[in-house]
């Protein structure tokens, strides 16, 4: 370890308490989505970043009231750009009277920090801001640029947050990206399954339920269409060898945290029949019916392949059609990529050799960066009661995630441009 790195790590350790206090302050400024008004929190975040050495801060609003904050920290020497992404918005509080801790209190009890968004992702936001602070303080020893993007539209899709910034603000693109979105300190996530939402529709002919010879029930072909769509589970993905190897190595640790069967879910096409609609009253033959399916696909399978397969499966059902409502291909950063290996090495150095790297079942804003060719990893704290009553995050998780992110940022920015 170089003397500069040793001094930097000492500075990071001294701020372990500060990052927790900062997380409390962030929780105390509500940013529920809906309604999606991140303006008050954006002002708090901008104030934390303004005045840092070598730092410029701007508030960018693509769609009122979802404010985004972007900070640029220039280092002493030319080099690469590292982006740290976090989101400002949270799930709604819901019925506050059911909480046993104040939803916006930021109260710490028995090592738990309570509040809406504590795990998703005020803790990750605090990590990003404190990492920016320590990098700014040591920028004279580093190369390149750190850009922190704090976005106001993650919970509702990201169109006016991360996606907008990537499409319209050139310096929000980088050579690598870190996110501290909700997860686990024991599992670094380097990829996410893709998603396809499909609506299947069928038509029939209405008549009285007693006169079935005069009608044509739309629900019956819909049920057959659903049965056929379930065959998507049998698709055989060609998962890249490096990705599959990491998933296999991570299986025991990751499933202990996320539940038995996670490996099978990650490595196969899954389908959830989420909504079925049809009919009005029991004695009328329904002339329309529909179902909405949530299909998730691993690396090695594309949206186009799935859509083509659905088309083939339903082609001989004359009263059935389908529409893709939204879709995204799987997104993966090789677990052998520099940003992934740096983060994993720092996590293991800080927490022990049991930390693993794996895919992620759900989706995050990381997909927007990967789809544009930017290596991206997610390493964040474990959320508890996320979106529910008495949401909390463990204090030690906040500190550990900050430590790993800060050290990874230092290591990445210590290397000049090639």
Image: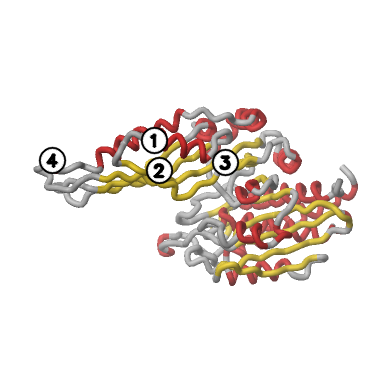
> Which percent across, then down, holds residue 9?
81, 50
Work out whether mark 4 precedes mark 3 in sequence or the reverse, and give the earlier one. 4
Residue drawn at point x = 54 percent, y = 58 percent? 117
Mark pair 1, 2: CA separation: 9 Å
- 266 left or right, relative to 273: right
Which corner quadrant holds the N terminus? top right
SS for dot 2: strand
Mark 1 nearby-residue class (10 Å; few <14, some 14–19, many ≥20) = many
The residue where tag 1 is placed is 229
Q: Are marks 1 and 2 in contact (CB under 8 Å)?
A: yes
Mark pair 3, 1: CA separation: 20 Å
Residue 20, visible in the rendered structure: no
The residue where tag 3 is placed is 330
- 5 left or right, relative to 277: right
Nearer to us: label 4 or label 3: 4
Q: Report the residue that reaches farthest toward the left.
A: 210
Work out whether mark 1 precedes mark 2 in sequence or the reverse, and give the earlier one. 1
Residue 283, visible in the rendered structure: yes
Mark 2 nearby-residue class (10 Å; few <14, some 14–19, many ≥20) = many
The residue where tag 2 is placed is 293
The residue where tag 4 is placed is 212
Mark 4 nearby-residue class (10 Å; few <14, some 14–19, many ≥20) = some
Mark pair 4, 3: CA separation: 45 Å
> Which percent across, then down, holds residue 160?
57, 62
> Which percent across, then down, holds residue 175?
75, 49
Work out whether mark 1 precedes mark 4 in sequence or the reverse, and give the earlier one. 4
Mark pair 3, 2: CA separation: 17 Å
Q: Which mark is residue 387?
A: none
């Amino acid at each position: 370890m170089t003397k500069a790195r040793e001094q930097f790590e000492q500075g990071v350790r001294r701020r372990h308490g500060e990052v927790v206090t900062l997380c409390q302050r962030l929780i105390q400024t509500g940013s529920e989505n809906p309604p999606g008004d991140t303006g008050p929190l954006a002002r708090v975040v901008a104030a934390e970043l303004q005045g840092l050495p070598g730092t410029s801060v701007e508030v960018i609003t693509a769609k009122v009231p979802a404010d985004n904050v972007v900070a640029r920290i220039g280092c002493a020497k030319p080099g690469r750009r590292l982006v740290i992404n976090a989101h400002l918005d949270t799930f709604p509080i819901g019925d506050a009277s059911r909480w046993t801790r104040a939803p916006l209190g930021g109260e710490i009890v028995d090592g738990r920090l309570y509040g809406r968004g504590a795990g998703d992702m005020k803790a990750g936001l605090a990590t990003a801001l404190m990492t920016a602070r320590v990098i700014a303080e040591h920028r004279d020893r580093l190369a390149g640029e750190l850009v922190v993007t704090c976005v106001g539209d993650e919970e509702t899709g990201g169109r006016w947050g991360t996606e907008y910034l990537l499409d319209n603000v050139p310096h929000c693109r980088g050579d690598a990206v870190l996110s501290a979105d909700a997860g686990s300190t024991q599992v670094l996530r380097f990829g996410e399954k893709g998603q396809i939402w499909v609506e299947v529709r069928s038509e029939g002919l209405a008549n009285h339920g007693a006169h079935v010879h005069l009608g044509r029930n739309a629900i019956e072909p819909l049920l057959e269409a659903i049965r056929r769509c379930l065959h998507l589970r049998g698709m055989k993905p060609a998962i890249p060898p490096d990705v599959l190897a990491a998933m296999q190595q991570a299986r025991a640790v990751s499933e202990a945290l996320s539940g038995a069967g996670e490996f099978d879910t990650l490595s196969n096409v899954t389908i959830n029949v989420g909504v079925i609609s049809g009919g009005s009253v029991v004695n009328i033959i329904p002339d329309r019916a529909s179902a909405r399916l949530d299909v998730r696909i691993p690396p090695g399978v594309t949206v186009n392949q799935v859509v083509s397969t659905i088309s083939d499966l339903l082609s001989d059902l004359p009263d059935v059609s389908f529409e893709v409502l939204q879709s995204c291909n799987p997104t993966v950063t090789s677990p052998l990529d520099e940003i992934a290996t740096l983060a994993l090495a720092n996590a293991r150095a800080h927490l022990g050799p049991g930390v693993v790297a794996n895919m992620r079942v759900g989706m995050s804003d990381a997909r927007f960066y990967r789809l544009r060719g930017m290596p991206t990893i997610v390493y964040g704290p474990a959320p508890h009661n996320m979106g529910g009553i008495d949401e909390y995050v463990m204090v030690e998780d906040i500190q550990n995630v900050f430590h790993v992110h800060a050290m990874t940022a230092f290591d990445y920015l210590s290397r000049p441009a090639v």
